[in-house]
Image (tube, grey):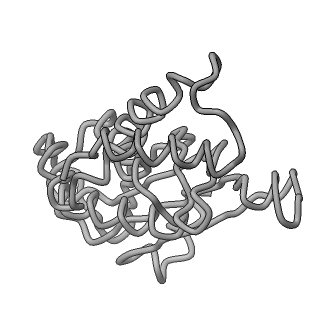
């Protein structure tokens, strides 16, 4: 479903009025249109299911890498920068760093696709916990590997700029699937 830019413009104009501002003053008259265009970009992921995102970035390469006893071939991509918007306050989640790891199961995904998946998943109204779950689900679908881990570190403006106002607070979430759930050695390799 595409974002309804006309409805966004109408509602942003109404929000500006509700905040006690004049939507026709010079600095605000084009704001509804700017916000609608921004929302179209930053919420692009809303229009796609996890399966559709997996299909979009389904570029893999056949490989002989496999998990074997005594060998632990793991692909890890760290420090993927993303941002998202909290579904509870529509507040920015920022300075987010994502780590994605998986054990190849006969094929590997193009490394840039891992970052693209993380980016697309974040372009929804989200919870940090769900971002990790969604990324893990998509990586597992694309690679055919049940062994996936996603770690996310992020700051939330709903905690730093309002409410409790703890500007240094960071939130860490970990999503573990397959062997990452029980194998402490694998868990240590992604930290």
Q: Residue at x 54, y 23 (%)?
A: 29
Q: Is residue 136 above or below residue 41?
A: below
On the image, the x and y values in percent for residue 141 come to 19, 63
Position in image of residue 11 (x %, y %): 45, 48
Residue 125 in the image: state x and y as whole percent. 45, 58
Picture residue at 33% right of the left edge, 69% below the top: 147
Q: Is residue 16 left or right of residue 142?
A: right
Above or below, 128 against 52 in this view is below
On the rendered image, what quadrant is the C terminus found in? bottom right
Closer to us: 76 or 166: 166
Q: Is residue 78 left or right of residue 133?
A: right
Q: Is residue 120 left or right of residue 42?
A: left
In the rendered image, residue 129, in percent from the top left (x then y), is placed at: 52, 70
Q: Is residue 163 above or below residue 118?
A: below
Frontmost residue, 73 versus 171: 171
At 16% from the left and 61% from the top, the residue drawn is: 51
Q: Quadrant of residue 143?
A: bottom left
């Amino acid at each position: 479903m595409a974002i309804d830019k006309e409805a966004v413009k109408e509602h942003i104009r109404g929000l500006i009025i509700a905040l006690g501002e004049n939507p026709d003053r010079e600095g605000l008259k084009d704001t509804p249109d700017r916000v609608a265009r921004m929302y179209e970009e930053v919420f692009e992921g809303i229009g796609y299911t996890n399966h559709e995102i997996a299909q979009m970035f389904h570029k893999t390469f056949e490989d002989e890498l496999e998990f074997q006893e005594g060998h632990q071939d793991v692909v890890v991509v760290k420090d993927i920068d993303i941002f998202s918007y909290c579904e509870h306050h529509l507040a920015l989640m920022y300075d987010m760093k994502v780590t994605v790891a998986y054990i190849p199961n006969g094929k590997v995904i193009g490394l840039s696709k891992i970052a693209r998946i993380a980016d697309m998943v974040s372009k929804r109204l989200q919870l940090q916990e769900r971002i990790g779950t969604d990324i893990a689900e998509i990586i597992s679908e694309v690679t055919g590997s049940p062994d996936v881990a996603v770690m996310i570190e992020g700051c939330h403006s709903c905690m730093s700029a309002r409410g409790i106002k703890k500007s240094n607070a960071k939130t860490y979430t970990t999503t573990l699937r397959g062997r990452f759930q029980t194998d402490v050695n694998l868990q240590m390799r992604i930290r």
